[in-house]
Amino acid sequence: MKFRRILALALVGTMALSATAFAEGETTDITMWTYPVGDWGNAEVMDGLIAKFNEVHPEINVKVEYLDYTNGDDQVNTAIEGGQAPDIVFEGPERLVANWGAKGLMVDLADLWTDEAKEAIYDSVENACKSNDGVYYEYPLCMTAHTMAINRDVFEAADALQYLDEETRTWTTEGFLNAVKAVYESGQDPVGAVYCSGQGGDQGTRALVNNLYGGTFTNEDHTAYTLDSEENVKALQLLADTDGINFDASIAGGDEIQLFCNGTLAMAFCWNVAQEKNNAEIIDFDVLPMAFPSETGEPKLCGGIWGFGIFNNGDEAKIAAAKTFIDFMANDESIAADSVKASTYWPVKDLGNIYEGNDLMTEYATFIQYMGDYYQVVGGWAEARTAWWNMLQQIGTGADVATAVADFQTTANAAAGK
Amino acid sequence: MAGKAKKTTGYSMSRALVRRETIAGYAFMLPNLVFFVGFVIYPMIQCVITSFFDSTMNRADIFVGLGNYIELFQDGVFLRALWNTIIIVVVSVPVTCIFSLWVSSIIYDLKGPFCSLLRCVFYLPVVTGSVAVAVVWKWMYNNYYGIFNYVGKGLGLIDKNINWLGDERFALGCIILILLTTSVGQPIVLYVSALNNVDASLVEAAEVDGANRMQCFWRIKWPQIMPTTLYILVITTINSFQCFALIQLLTSGGPNHSTDTIMYYIYHTAFKLYRYGYGNAMGVVLAIIIAVLSAAQFKMAQSD
């Protein structure tokens, strides 16, 4: 009798184990590597989002690894070379589309880009998420517009607020120059710094130069660099000649932010909402985020767009699971707003005011309307970024602006043509 | 006959013992050897091979023969980086050696905790992480609120702030100064130990014969610490040629390539621009330069 009981228990145990094994067999494991885009780099927040995903899709197990911008590219590239690329990577079009997509490493996400999605997502964002030949390598989640910022207290004391529009957060090139002059003459030296020790935060200096006289960084097709236009050369010359604006080869974007926050500089060209949040404790003045100055007062801001790409690892089940995850995170009503909020930026489609009651986010939402062309998908981007800060260093040490720009053009366009 | 048999047995036992010990020796070496071959020899060979290819990410390598090497010597940035590296070596190697010998000769015969304290002080930058060192120096050199500008202006040495790391005229000098502070610790410890090992009876005998301190040093101590000097020269030369972290953390090679070194340019080319073949060609050239210089240093020391 006892033996039979043991046998029955053993049989039941075996069946239970088999059932578990069967269920486990149906689970698909995928990996996602995410750059630190707001709380998409925060394990606690991500665990919460993935738990919500697993309530609906328990059959997909998502393992997240967190990258930083210092070593992230090296880690991803090493993984690619070793055949160990993640299934999903969370970043922007300059990497997903212009780099890994262009090299044929990414999956075409056309089936996620349904007609409904195309209609909902802003056109400028959609254009940034596909290659020049129309293949979608990114499915976007969030976006922001990179701005500049001024120390409102210093500007007010110098009577320089009259040169800008506080309501629309815009100013003309003439207004900008008058404001810089007023602040400089009030004793603030330097007023701002064209930082150029490295590529960190270079979107700010690019936006400044392009906006001043309406120049562009690339052509419309994003196939060639157009820095040698008359407008850009004029803007660079203007910055080089303006008292109170230093070309500083000892600082990069992050340093400039610190110098602005501690009151050393009266304006920052590398700014967005994240900077104001992250530095709230050390800022003891009123920060006024501003669009970059332009001749017409109609700025075209550099944007940041972040979303998902899938590496083609040749496993259809994993690719399908990755697409399910992306679709859920970006489109499911139960979580889409939370996914965007986790990034601390704004949605790439109309999700209503997801930051209702949050004055800071509402203030910065003003700038989304000024988003310009997302040109960072141009070829030879890595070389062009290096050439950019090298060019600024040359100008800062007194080199002829036209010659320095010509050097940049040669290097960048040679890289774009490869 | 019996003696012969005994002798033969003894010989064969000895051979077996030798064989067993040899096998044991190789077995102990094997793990290290595997790692050495896998992580040093193989990458070195791969580096040399790749230097003959146009090699980048996710694309089949294209054989270019000596193309990368020819391009190297037409590349203005590489030549500038080579020149900067030579300046760093030429300045920092003799200064490090002379300064550490001077400090060591002062402190080696100090007794008790004072000698240990000084050794600790000079060795501290060596064991401090290069990132921490760079952050502190970056603050001291800061254009806006750095201590050098503050003191300089306070003493009336400068009228307005100097952008130490952002000005071509000063940036490389600033890097060399940091390099010196982080390089002297190990030579000082080595020299102190070498000076302590100098035969005291010879020094006493020379002093009895009327030799002054300088004569004692050059005639008695210097020849005895020569092997240490040679070692310090070689490691300081190699470290100076491989100056990378400070450049990466402080200037990224700027302003205007004035602080580019070969090591930094290799890193930038290979891991930022993904031109592995070109980067490897630079690595091969750097290795050849270091090997030739080290050989020359050994040769000179032997002839002395």
Image (tube, grey):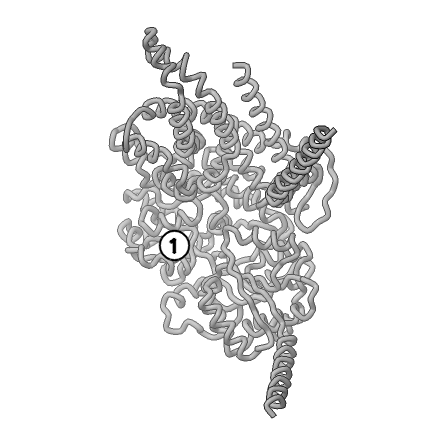
Identify the residue position indicated by label 1 in the image: A149
Q: Looking at the rendering, which quadrant does residue A133 occupy?
A: bottom right
Q: Position of residue A267 (x, y in %)?
A: 37, 50
Q: Position of residue A352 (x, y in %)?
A: 47, 75
Q: Is residue A46 above or below residue A260?
A: below
- Give the structural element (helix, strand or loop) at label 1: strand
Q: Quadrant of the N terminus of chain B?
A: top right
Tell me the crowding category of disc 1: few under 14, some 14 to 19, or many 20 or more residues within 10 angstroms, Cα based.
many
Q: Looking at the rendering, which quadrant does residue A63 occupy?
A: bottom right
**Which residue is nearer to you in this view: A48 or B30?**
B30
Q: Is residue B248 above or below residue A54?
A: above
Evaluate whether residue A333 shows in this view: yes
Q: Looking at the rendering, which quadrant does residue B149 occupy?
A: top left
Q: Residue at x 63, y 70 (%)?
A: A113
Q: Amino acid at mark 1?
A: Ala
Q: Residue at x 42, y 29 (%)?
A: B190
